[in-house]
Amino acid sequence: MTALSTFPNQSPALALFPSLRGKRVFITGGGTGIGAAMVEAFAEQGAQLAFVDMAEAESRALTQRITDAGHPPPWWRVCDVRDIAALQHTMEQAITELGDFSVLVNNVARDDRHSLESVTPEYWDERMAVNQRPAFFAIQSIVPAMKRLGGGSIINLGSTGWQSKGGGYPCYAIAKSSVNGLTRGLASSLGAYRIRVNTVSPGWVMTERQIKLWLDAEGEAEIKRNQCLPDKLQPSDIARMVLFLASDDGAMCTAQEFKVDAGWN
């Protein structure tokens, strides 16, 4: 089955996953960038969405785009995921108001640049509070709901940057390399409840932030040199892999890392 996309930068002939219709999906960092593309993609599939983000104006605009396209508005809240108590309370609110969630996408992260010499214990803790801790505690919060449903899919967003030895963000590299450990460390115990856990690791995705901060002539040359495919990665490219893993089509995929990087790594 195919659908005519109502969102920009998406092909008009991409797959529909019938199992996603009506499925409840929770996304962290869903208001901007890759997260927003995933919210849009799940809305197009007819999923029932909830997300959190710090970017209030962008989240409101995203919700408006979705409703303008004829889809139900997602449930969303402003939430600083560094505050684990606030994150878990917000997730409990969503479960109470919408029902149990069968899909969790741990997306939130920031690749702020820093040097080895500049890192203090306080900065280290703050980087881990953004890039590492929220994923674990979001899983902890949502697993009881998935057990009640008899299964679910957890998708952790990793990174290929540390795998290609990208420099300039050692704390980010450490945090993102731990995502694969989180995925593989939980897959066996949660698999007994038919809860699948996978990692999706994007390459260099052309979000507004990446284009503004890092895409210069040198960056263009690096893409051309390292990618096997000539086209730039878009947030929607990552969303398509996430849709598959969230759907019943990915029912026997767990404990794996799926790279979407145009062949860079």
Image (tube, helix red, strand yellow):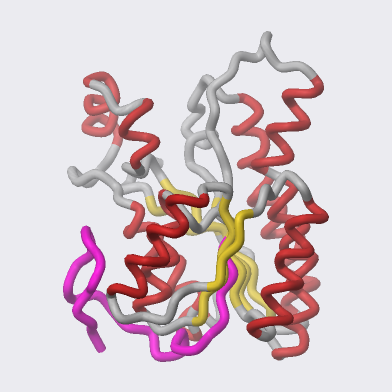
Residue at 53% x, 20% y is 168
Residue at 61% x, 75% y is 153
Position in image of residue 164 (x %, y %): 47, 33
Asked whether 177 or 146 is in front, the reply is 146
Seen as rendered, the residue at the extreme top is 117
Picture quarter with the C terminus: top left
Above or below: residue 167 compared with residue 188: above
Position in image of residue 102 (x %, y %): 62, 80
Above or below: residue 150 compared with residue 120: below
Position in image of residue 217 (x %, y %): 22, 20
Q: Can residue 262 be seen?
A: yes
Above or below: residue 248 compared with residue 175: below
Horizontal side, residue 222 vs residue 46: left or right: left
Residue span colored magenta: 1-27
Above or below: residue 11 compared with residue 232: below
Asked whether 251 or 87 is in front, the reply is 87
Residue at 82% x, 55% y is 85
Horizontal side, residue 86 vs residue 249: left or right: right
Asked whether 61 or 177 is in front, the reply is 61
Residue 11 is one of the magenta-drawn residues: yes
Q: Report the number of numbered marks.
A: 0
Position in image of residue 99 (x %, y %): 67, 85
Residue at 44% x, 66% y is 39
Q: Can residue 254 be seen?
A: no
Residue 167 is one of the magenta-drawn residues: no
Give residue 196's quadrant in the image.
bottom right
Give residue 1's quadrant in the image.
bottom left
